[in-house]
Amino acid sequence: MTPAQGVTPVEDCLVLGPGDVERQLKVMEVLTSSVKRSILGLLARSPGGLAAKEIAESLGVSLPTVLEHLESLVSSGLVRLEDRGRRSKVYKLVVDCIQMRIELNQYYSLGEDSLKELALRFLEEKLSQEKGRLSIPVGVREVARVLGLDRRTAARVAMLINRDRGLVTSLLEPRLLKLLSEKPLTSVAEVAERLSVDNSIAALLVMELVERGLVTTGPRGISLAGDSDASARS
C-alpha cells in the first residue's frame, strides 16, 4: 500500500479474518466516526505521537471527548498509548492499512430486534447493581459476563449500545423524571450520582430532556419544566 502524501508509514497492515469478529466490529465503529477518523489523520502525520491535549486543541474538541475516542481507538488496535514517564503520555498510530475478511453469516445470524432486547437487558442489569456506575463505552467482556453470551454476540450487543446512546437515555428518562417530581437536583453530577451513571451519560440525558421541553436548568439547578413549586421544595 502506498502511503498518502504527507503521511508517514507505520507498520504492516492489520489483518482481521473471520474469527476476529469482535475486532472487526471495533474497527468498523472507528471508521464510521468522523472524529475518530480525524484523530487517525492527525496521528498519521505525527510519527512521534501526540498527547491527548494536543489532539483536543488541534481538532477543537473537548479533552474528555477526545479521551473517550482515544480509548476506542486503542481498544480497536489501531492506536497505542505510550507512557514516557514524568506524566508524559502520547498516542501513536499502529498501522496505516487494514485488511478484513468478513463472513456475513456471523453478522446477520442475530436480528436487530434480538440485539436490542439483549442490550436493554444488559443496561437494566447494570443499573440495578448497587455498586459501581454505568459508563459508556461498554466492554465486550463485561457484556458477555453479565448476559452469559459468547464473545461474538457480546461484541454485537456492545457495539449497539456504544453506537446508540438513545438506548441508555430511554431507560433513564422515567427514572430522572420521577426524581425531579420529588425535588430539583442541583447539578449534572448529582443526576449522575442518583442514577448511578457517569457524568457524560447524565449530561446527555439532561440535554435531551431540555431540548424536548420536559426539563429546565438554571441557577436553582435542574427541575421539571413548568414546575412552579420547584423553588419552594428546593
Image (cartoon, helix red, strand yellow):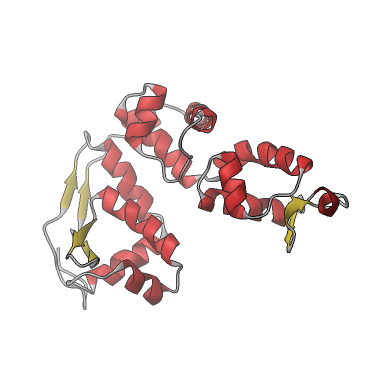
Q: In the rendered image, which quarter is residue 22 located in? A: top left
Residue 50 makes an appearance in the image: yes
Check the image and name the residue furthest to the right: 228
In percent of the image, x 75 and y 59: which residue is there?
Answer: 220
Measured as percent of width and height from the top left, residue 43 is found at 26, 68
* Image quadrant containing the N terminus: bottom left
> Is 71 located above or below residue 133 in the figure?
below
Q: 181 or 31: nearer the eye?
A: 181
The answer to whether residue 166 shows anywhere in this view is no
Residue 81: image quadrant is bottom left
* Residue 224 shown left or right of residue 112 in the figure: right
Residue 208 placement (x, y as % from top left): 65, 52
Work out whether 110 lies above or below 14. above
Image mark count: 0
Residue 45 image offset from top left, x and y in percent: 23, 74
Among the 4 quarters of the image, the one containing residue 18: top left
**Front residue (pair 34, 61):** 61
Name the residue at 77% across, 54% down. 213
User: Residue sitting at 40 percent across and 54 percent down?
Assistant: 32
- Seen from the viewer's position, the closer of residues 60 and 28 is 60
Q: Looking at the image, is 190 positioned above or below residue 47?
A: above
The residue furthest left is 12
- Horizontal and vertical percent for residue 123? 51, 33
- Side (left or right) of 35 relative to 211: left
Query: Horizontal placement of 49 versus 127: left or right?
Result: left
Report the front residue among 220 and 163.
220
Q: Which residue is painted at 11% across and 60% down in the image? A: 11
